[in-house]
Amino acid sequence: MFSREGNARSDSQNRWLAGYLAFVGGFVNSSGFVLIGTFSSHVTGNVGRLANDAATGQYAAAVAALTLVLCFFSGAFAASVIIESRVLGAPRARAYALALATESVLLLLFTLLSSVTVTAHPRVRDAETALLCAAMGLQNALVSRLSGAVVRTTHLTGVITDLGIESARWFRFWRRSLSEVTKLPLVLGRNPAERPTSAKALLLGTIAASFLAGASSGAYSAVHWQHASMLIAAAAVAAAAFYALHNARTRSVLE
């Protein structure tokens, strides 16, 4: 799953990667919201919060919102530096292992900090959220780099948009097929309705389903096990790091 990058990856490898880490992204986002009342796996909401807080004169809150955006950026930056510099040498799977291990540590730090915090002050909550934002930014950049910008695993806006596009293509193709059988003009427009590739629809569906499953599991876990629930996500990411390291060792032996 971590031995190839970009166009060298198979559709199956991208689906496995997307499904696994989209589950983690949904879990962290939902569990974090139950625990501290803030979504952390995307930037859009925090940018909106930044604008609102600044407009209403809540400048401390606006700075905190900006900090969350910058933490997401910092996570993406750190992942890219780790991967591009190959600090652990070749093969590159070692860099992915290090990036995933860093994400796992951030989730563990969140668990520790949120467990010992005795106040629910908004700025303290923002400090806890910053760790999750950094972890999600790191994961998003890692997956984007590994898949050649084909896979996103921390938010669903683009995924749902792409699903709508693919659904429209399949809809036109099915109408064309039905039109050929019934001899009725069912295809709208002059542009020919070509058969779309099923691989992209399967990938998008996998991401959406896995994120939803992770979000549901994260919310349930946070409600029943409170702060300890994030240990599940940390363990899942750590397992991916060990798997990436195993890929690296296997490739080193083969080479």
Image: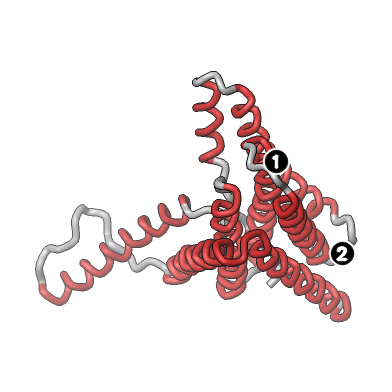
Q: Are marks 1 and 2 in contact (CB under 8 Å)?
A: no
Point out the image quarter for the C terminus: bottom right
Question: Which image quarter: residue 22?
Answer: bottom right
Q: Give residue 58's position: percent from left, percent from top.
A: 57, 23
Q: Give residue 211's position: percent from left, percent from top.
A: 51, 63
User: Is 238 left or right of 190, judged from the image as shown?
Assistant: right
Q: Secondary structure at mark 2?
A: loop
Q: Does residue 37 appear in this view?
A: yes
- The residue drawn where x is 55% and y is 62% is 223
User: Is 86 left or right of 57, judged from the image as shown?
Assistant: right
**Label for residue 78?**
none
- Say which residue label 2 marks: 90
- Say which residue label 1 marks: 127
Circle 1 or circle 2, nearest the eye: 1
- The residue drawn where x is 58% and y is 61% is 222
- The residue drawn where x is 89% and y is 55% is 87
At label 2, counting other C-alpha atoms closer than 10 Å, the crowd grade (few under 14, some 14-19, many 20 or more) is few
Question: Which image quarter: residue 226?
Answer: bottom right
* Above or below, comparing residue 85 to residue 121 in the picture: below
* Above or below, comparing residue 54 to residue 135 in the picture: above
Q: Secondary structure at mark 1?
A: helix
* Above or below, comparing residue 253 to residue 188 in the picture: below
Q: What's the distance in space between the residues labelled 1 and 2, CA to CA? A: 35 Å
Q: Give residue 15's position: percent from left, percent from top.
A: 56, 71
Q: Does residue 3 appear in this view?
A: no
Q: Amino acid at mark 1?
A: Ala
Precedes in sequence: disc 1 or disc 2: 2
Q: Amino acid at mark 2?
A: Ala
